[in-house]
């Protein structure tokens, strides 16, 4: 299915302007990725500077140029979000909610962040500033990877964290990083500025395929894998395996590719086993039958309903099961559709999953999250869904740009 693209320009003419707006875009996107936890808490609800900047960018993008219009595929994405939000509101209205903060976080993730991604990372911004956005994305990922490795080593050697209120940590969380379940035996997980190894792993795994399309330094590419390994998180390790497999297959399946994957798998198993031993665990840690304490969540499957009677609290690590618990079978279907609609539309527009290029890379990042979410989705936690919809928005723009370039080449041949 070819999307009907409604834009300000008849063709996606790409320019790279530098001015006040460019500086705002660069500073905002860098801060959102590099310092996602900086901010304050109001009534227990995190108010991060990064999320405030999403609103600023959305407003500025809406009022740029002669007007604003969204492509059909972006409107379909937001329609799926509205349907999920509508069903969720009905169920919460019936059953109630125990925590206002969790309810607000849920609807921010379901409604606001998709709107942010679809509006900001569209032709209105990227046609003129795509090079700035790509370079900012590149340096932001480089920063969180390099800083994460540095902080990991610093913590192990000194026993202290580096905490900068409003920047690397929420002002209300200063001195509380050790309480965030980030210890593995004698080690502390790599958390970078994300304050949590699993959240860092989820976000980096989503961004990695696109990052690898831009990053030319083999050292920095290797450092990203090292950072994911040092999270000491099985969820992040799953992400590592998915990234590596998709990257390898995208370059073409050859006998050497299969051998490369097998050797890398063996080396990874040895490394993960060594890490488990260093944390005071045995190799059963790698395939914990207790699912890291999440096994009890599977009990939800024995009592699936159309409309449950549970008041909404907080989605657990396995978000799919939490959605069944609080929003029933229809909620699960709508939730999966909410996550899957972007890669589905990209596929219908002709994007191949296993291919080299930024469009396929964005599609891979979205699917990697959907798979990792089977272990730990961190759905309501900052900045997971912000990154997800950032990648989705960029994926649609890359797809439209590629379609235009192919159409232009075809016209030139004829």
Image (cartoon, helix red, strand yellow):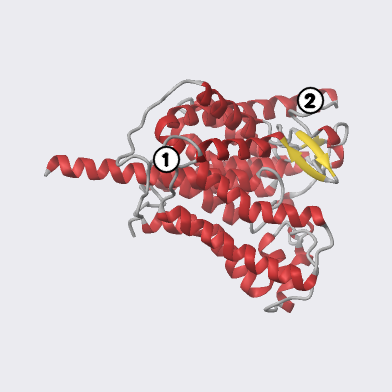
* Residue 164, placed above or below residue 107: above
As rendered, which of 108 and 356 lies closer to the eye?
108
As rendered, which of 175 and 269 lies closer to the eye?
175
* Residue 30, placed above or below residue 357: above
Which residue is identified by label 2? Answer: 164
Q: For the residue labelled by badge 2, is the local secondary structure a helix, a strand or a loop?
A: loop
At a point 85% along the width and 26% down the height, the residue shown is 160
At a point 49% along the width and 27% down the height, the residue shown is 135
- Residue 309 seen by the camera: yes
Task: Tell me if 172 is positioned left or right of 20 in this view.
Answer: right
- Residue 184 seen by the camera: no
Foreground tag (1 vs 2)? 1
Instruction: Check disc 1: other Cα within 10 Å, few if <14, some if 14-19, many if 20+.
Output: many
At a point 13% along the width and 41% down the height, the residue shown is 413
Please state the horizontal and vertical placement of residue 131, each as a whole percent of the image.
43, 28
Measured Cα–Cα span from mark 1 to mark 2? 35 Å
Q: For the residue labelled by badge 1, is the local secondary structure a helix, a strand or a loop?
A: helix
* Residue 33, placed above or below residue 346: above
At a point 44% along the width and 38% down the height, the residue shown is 124
As rendered, which of 403 and 242 lies closer to the eye?
403
Which residue is identified by label 1? Answer: 123
Name the outermost residue toward the front.
66
Instruction: Check disc 2: other Cα within 10 Å, few if <14, some if 14-19, many if 20+.
Output: few
Task: Tell me if 279 is positioned left or right of 366 in this view.
Answer: right
Residue 39: which quarter of the image? top right
Please state the horizontal and vertical placement of residue 412, each as a whole percent of the image.
15, 39
């Amino acid at each position: 299915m070819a999307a009907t693209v409604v834009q300000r320009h008849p063709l996606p003419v790409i320019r790279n302007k530098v001015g006040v707006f460019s500086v705002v875009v660069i500073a905002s996107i860098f801060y959102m990725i590099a310092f996602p936890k900086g901010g304050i808490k109001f009534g227990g609800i995190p108010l991060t500077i990064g999320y405030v900047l999403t609103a600023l960018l959305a407003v500025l993008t809406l009022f740029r140029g002669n007007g604003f219009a969204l492509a059909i595929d972006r409107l379909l994405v937001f329609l799926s979000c509205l349907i999920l939000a509508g069903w969720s509101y009905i169920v919460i209205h019936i059953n109630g909610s125990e925590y206002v903060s969790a309810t607000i976080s849920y609807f921010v993730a379901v409604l606001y962040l998709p709107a942010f991604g679809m509006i900001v990372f569209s032709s209105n911004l990227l046609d003129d500033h795509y090079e700035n956005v790509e370079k900012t994305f590149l340096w932001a990922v480089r920063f969180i990877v390099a800083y994460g490795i540095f902080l990991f080593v610093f913590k192990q050697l000194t026993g202290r964290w580096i905490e900068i209120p409003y920047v690397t940590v929420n002002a209300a969380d200063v001195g509380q990083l050790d309480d965030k379940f980030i210890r593995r035996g004698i080690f502390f997980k790599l958390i970078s500025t994300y304050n949590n190894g699993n959240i860092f792993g989820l976000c980096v795994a989503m961004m990695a395929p696109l990052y690898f399309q831009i990053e030319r330094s083999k050292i920095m590419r290797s450092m990203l894998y090292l950072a994911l390994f040092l999270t000491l998180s099985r969820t992040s390790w799953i992400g590592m395996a998915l990234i590596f497999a998709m990257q390898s297959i995208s370059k073409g399946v050859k006998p050497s590719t299969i051998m490369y994957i097998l050797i890398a798998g063996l080396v990874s198993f040895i490394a993960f086993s060594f890490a488990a031993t260093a944390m005071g665990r045995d190799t059963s840690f790698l395939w914990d039958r207790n699912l890291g304490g999440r096994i009890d969540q599977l009990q939800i499957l024995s009592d699936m309903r159309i409309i449950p009677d549970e008041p909404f609290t907080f989605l657990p690590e396995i978000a799919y099961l939490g959605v069944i618990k609080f929003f029933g079978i229809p909620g699960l279907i709508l939730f999966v559709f909410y996550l899957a609609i972007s890669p589905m539309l990209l596929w219908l527009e002709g994007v191949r999953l296993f291919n080299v290029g930024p469009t396929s890379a964005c599609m891979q990042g979205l699917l990697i999250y959907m798979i990792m979410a089977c272990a730990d989705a961190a759905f309501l936690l900052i900045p997971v869904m912000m990154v997800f919809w950032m990648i989705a928005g960029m994926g649609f723009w890359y797809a439209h740009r590629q379609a235009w370039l192919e159409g232009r080449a075809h016209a030139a041949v004829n």
